[in-house]
Amino acid sequence: MVADAAGGPGDDTPDKDVTEDEFIERIAALSEEVLDLAETGRLAGDAEDEPLVMANINVLLRILRSLGNLLGGKGGQEAAREGAKGTVGKLVEQLARKAGRRIQKKILDQRRRAGKGAGRQGKGRDTGGLAKDIVPVATEVVSAAVRRKFQELNEERIRAGKKETKKVELVPDDLRPGAGNIEAIQSFVEAWKSGGLLPSSQHVAQLNLDKVDDAWAARVKKDTARLQKDAGVDVAGLRYAIDTGQLGHAFGRHGPGKEENTDQIPISPEAVSVYLDVIKNYDAITDVRGMKKGITIEFKKAVDGVVYVVQQIRTKQKNLSFFTMWIEQAK
């Protein structure tokens, strides 16, 4: 167990008597200890086929919060704290992405065993072949596709005497011809995280995916009816979609350095990339509630020792849109 900088293990209380020099020494020692853990493999796992030691992510997240409780101060003290937070933050990001890759691989393995490809899943069949690994579309290519969409759409609107729009919609083929859902979603998320996808924070890009399968819609209606004790939620004829606005919400609450629940694993682009497979093959619907935007439905599925929780929202725009997600450690 890594000791907190202000005291022993589990002690989040600031040491009021610590001097600035002692504070800097403790932060430096903490950073070195975390790095040593990573280098020896006890933090990230020695082999790709070994289970990821998720408890260590929780340790790092607790350290981040502990650092926030330590003496504020100025100068070297503040710099030391920020430097340590940066070091720990990078490790949390690496571990979250590694966890996401493991889950992604598990989903792909399940699809291969079921005789499906790694590409699109719609109306009972997949296209795109049996890819061994997902190869995301380059961030600059995705950003260029979004800019091109904005330009084409707004030129058309101006000719029609309309105001410019701040929202564009894409499909996987806009990112790469023949792109499957998993690689398209990961590419979309990676480009958004890079900060260069949109012209401004007021702009929104939406990735439209498959249409809802009739058999799946019937299952959702039946399960939501049982949960709500009413007619259930009708999602027939809707289309799955994910947009940058909700990505900001999801990563702002459940991303690396943001997830406050130490029983949960921070999300990553790899983890989000398989959300559609998760809800299409959900184990249970655990919550349904009304919101201003529409009706949210919470799906849960166990995957490789963790439990995915994805909230979708049935919107007035005829979409079943990604709302948020988090990953719980299986109990």
Image (tube, rainbow, N blue to C red):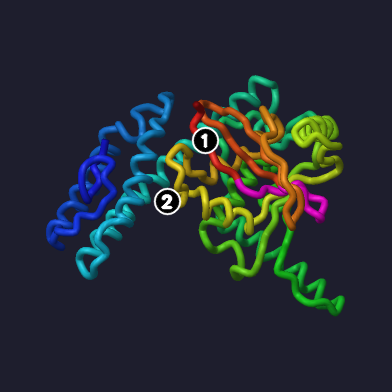
The residue tagged 2 is 257
- Report the amino acid beneath label 1: Glu
Q: Earlier in the sequence, mark 2 or mark 1?
A: 2
Foreground residue, 181 or 10?
Answer: 10
Which residue type carries mark 2? Gly
Q: Is residue 52 magenta?
A: no
Can you give x and y, in whole percent of width and height, for residue 223 in the image? 77, 31
Side of 141 where 233 appears, left or right: right
Residue 22 spot, x, y in % from top left? 13, 57
Circle 2: element type: loop
At 72% across and 37% down in the image, what residue appears? 120
Residue drawn at 51 percent across, 28 percent down: 330
Give left or right: position of 222 versus 59: right
- In this view, 114 is above or below 12: above
Left/right of residue 20 with respect to residue 304 in the rendered view: left
Residue 98 image offset from top left, x and y in percent: 45, 38
Which of the pair 85/169 is nearer the observer? 85
Residue 105 in sight: yes
Residue 157 location (% of width, % of height): 81, 73
Magenta residues span 313-324
Pick the residue in front: 130 or 327. Answer: 327
The secondary structure that dominates the magenta segment is strand
Residue 315 shown in magenta: yes
Give the SS element for disc 1.
strand
**Which dot marks residue 328?**
1
**Among all residues in the image, which is located at the extreme front?**
229
